[in-house]
Amino acid sequence: MSIIKWLEEWYESNCDDLWEHAYGVIIDTLDNPGWRLRFDIIETPYEHIVFDDVIIKRTDTDWIHCRKKDGYIDCGGGPKNLEEMLELVKKWMDDNKPR
C-alpha cells in the first residue's frame, strides 16, 4: 500500500462525525525549505502512547525532527523528507496498533 493510501485510510478511520471537525492532518511547507507534518492524535488510540523524539541530521537539506506534543505528532524535515516522515509516523502507529 502506498503511503498516501495509508494516510487516506488512517484519516478516514478516525472520522466519526466529530473528530474531523476539530482534528486532522496538516501537511505544510517550511521556508528553510522543507516540510511540516502534523498528525492530531487526540481521541485516537495513539493519544496516550509514548512517542520518542526523532532527530536525524544528515545534511542541511536532509533532516527530520519529530516529537509528540499536546496531543499531536509534529514533524519537520527537508524538502525531500516528506515521505520518510510519513513512513516514520506510520511505523510508530503500526508498532503500537491497538489490539
Image (tube, rainbow, N blue to C red):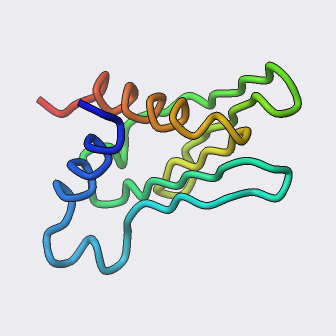
Residue at image location 63% in from the left, 53% down from the top: 36
Q: Position of residue 92 (x, y in %)?
A: 39, 28
Q: Position of residue 46 (x, y in %)?
A: 32, 43
Position of residue 6 relative to residue 25, above or below, is above
Q: Position of residue 39 (x, y in %)?
A: 45, 53
Residue at image location 32% in from the left, 47% down from the top: 7
Q: Position of residue 73 (x, y in %)?
A: 51, 47
Quarter of the figure that contains the N terminus: top left
Residue at image location 68% in from the left, 58% down from the top: 29
Viewer-closest of 37 and 92: 37
Question: In the picture provided, is 71 more to the left or to the right than 62?
Answer: left
Question: In the picture provided, is 69 more to the left or to the right than 71?
Answer: right
How many numbered circles does the render carry? Answer: 0
Residue at image location 72% in from the left, 23% down from the top: 56
The part of the image, by quadrant, that contains residue 20 is bottom left
Question: In the picture provided, is 17 more to the left or to the right than 63?
Answer: left
Quarter of the figure that contains the C terminus: top left
